[in-house]
Image (spheres, grey):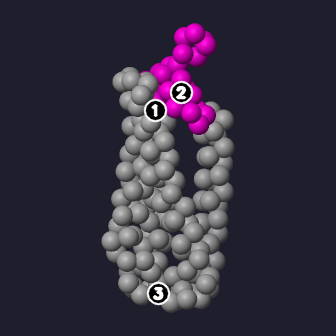
């Protein structure tokens, strides 16, 4: 936060700050990988599989998610995701990209997070067709998060100074 408030850029950070940011970003990347595997094994990749995971399928003996299950997941995500985006966003805002590009990436991540939390409710209690929102959420949240990680890592360690 101090570096951000002082207007520093990623290449000009102290080595110790770069190290702790790098470790955080690498652990976050590993967490994203685990999340991707978990999503693929739980809800699958197809729209039908995603809809079935949330809304159920009586013919297959798969029950829809209960309101309690959805509320528990939503509750956790309402705390964890904004905190993660807050931290990643602060590191990303130190990069040399222009303000409009940084703003677009941050807003895409926020929209993706909102869709990620709303989609299970809409699929379960609305219509199975809302499963398309899960894919939209995965793209709108996943791509910015990868940028939140890759861009700072590149800029911190490439020894290239950038300007806005």
Which stretch appears magenta? 43-70
Q: Which mark is residue 131?
A: 1
Quadrant housing residue 26: bottom right
Label whose residue precedes the other's in the sequence (1 or 2): 2
Q: Quadrant of the C terminus?
A: bottom left
| Cα distance between the residues tagged 1 and 2 | 8 Å
> Are the residues flagged by discs 1 and 3 in contact, CB closer than 8 Å?
no
Label whose residue precedes the other's in the sequence (1 or 3): 1
| Cα distance between the residues tagged 3 and 2 | 45 Å
**Is disc 2 placed on a helix, strand or loop?**
helix
Q: Residue at 52% across / 65% down in the picture?
A: 147
Camera-side residue of 121 and 158: 158
Label 2: few (<14), some (14–19) or many (≥20) C-alpha neighbours in 10 Å: some
Q: Name the residue under label 2.
A: 48
Q: Residue at 48% across / 72% down in the picture?
A: 91
> Are the residues flagged by discs 1 and 2 in contact, CB closer than 8 Å?
yes
Asked if residue 52 lies in the magenta stretch, the reply is yes
Quadrant housing residue 38: top right
Q: Where is residue 42 in the image (x, y as percent from the top left)?
A: 62, 33
| Cα distance between the residues tagged 1 and 3 | 40 Å
């Amino acid at each position: 936060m101090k570096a951000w408030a002082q207007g520093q850029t990623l290449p000009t950070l102290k080595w110790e700050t770069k190290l702790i940011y790098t470790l955080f970003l690498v652990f976050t990347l590993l967490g994203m990988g685990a999340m991707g595997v978990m999503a693929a094994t739980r809800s699958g990749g197809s729209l039908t599989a995603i809809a079935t995971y949330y809304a159920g399928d009586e013919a297959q003996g798969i029950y829809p998610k209960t309101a309690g299950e959805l509320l528990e997941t939503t509750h956790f995500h309402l705390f964890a995701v904004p905190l993660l985006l807050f931290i990643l966003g602060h590191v990303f805002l130190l990069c040399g990209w222009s303000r409009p590009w940084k703003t677009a990436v941050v807003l895409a991540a926020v929209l993706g997070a909102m869709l990620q939390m709303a989609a299970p409710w809409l699929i379960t209690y609305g219509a199975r067709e809302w499963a398309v929102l899960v894919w939209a959420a995965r793209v709108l949240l996943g791509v910015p998060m990868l940028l939140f990680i890759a861009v700072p890592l590149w800029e911190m360690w490439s020894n290239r100074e950038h300007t806005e």
